[in-house]
Image (cartoon, rainbow, N blue to C red):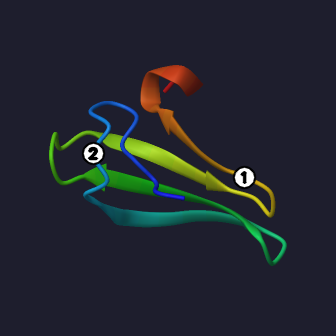
Amino acid sequence: MVITCPYCGMNNWAMVQFLSRRGSENFIIACRCNNCGKIFYLYKTKFATLTYKLEDIGL
């Protein structure tokens, strides 16, 4: 599975800050796309990996 930026669809991104850990397999990371420069959230669980734009979560 390739994790891509929800804004531009590219897979060239870097972790900005580790935000939260829920157990051994669930975590949230703030990431910055190296292509478009926008920040998004990466939410990883045991079963899925999701990316969210900042507008989608109301920040």
Query: Residue at the location (38% across, 55% down)?
Result: 31
Residue pointed to by mark 2: 10
Query: Residue at the location (72% across, 52% down)?
Result: 48
Q: Residue 18 carries which label?
A: none
Is 48 on the left or on the right of 14, as rendered?
A: right
**Few, some or many residues within 10 Å of mark 2 (<14, 14–19, 20+):** some
Query: Residue at the location (78% across, 72% down)?
Result: 25
Relative height, residue 8 to residue 32 (above, below): above
Query: Residue at the location (36% across, 42% down)?
Result: 5
What is the spatial separation of the Cα atoms under label 2 and label 1, in whole angstroms?
A: 19 Å
> Are the residues at dot 2 and dot 1 in contact (C-beta closer than 8 Å)?
no
Q: Which amino acid does label 1 sit on?
A: Ala
Which quadrant would the N terminus be assigned to in this image?
bottom right
**Earlier along the polypeptide chain: callout 2 or callout 1?**
2
Relative height, residue 56 to residue 3 (above, below): above
Spot occupied by residue 56 in the image (x, y as percentages of width and height)? 53, 22
Spot occupied by residue 47 in the image (x, y as percentages of width and height)? 80, 57
Q: What residue type is labelled 2?
A: Met
Q: Quadrant of the rendered structure where residue 10 is?
A: top left
Residue pointed to by mark 1: 48
Relative height, residue 48 to residue 5 (above, below): below
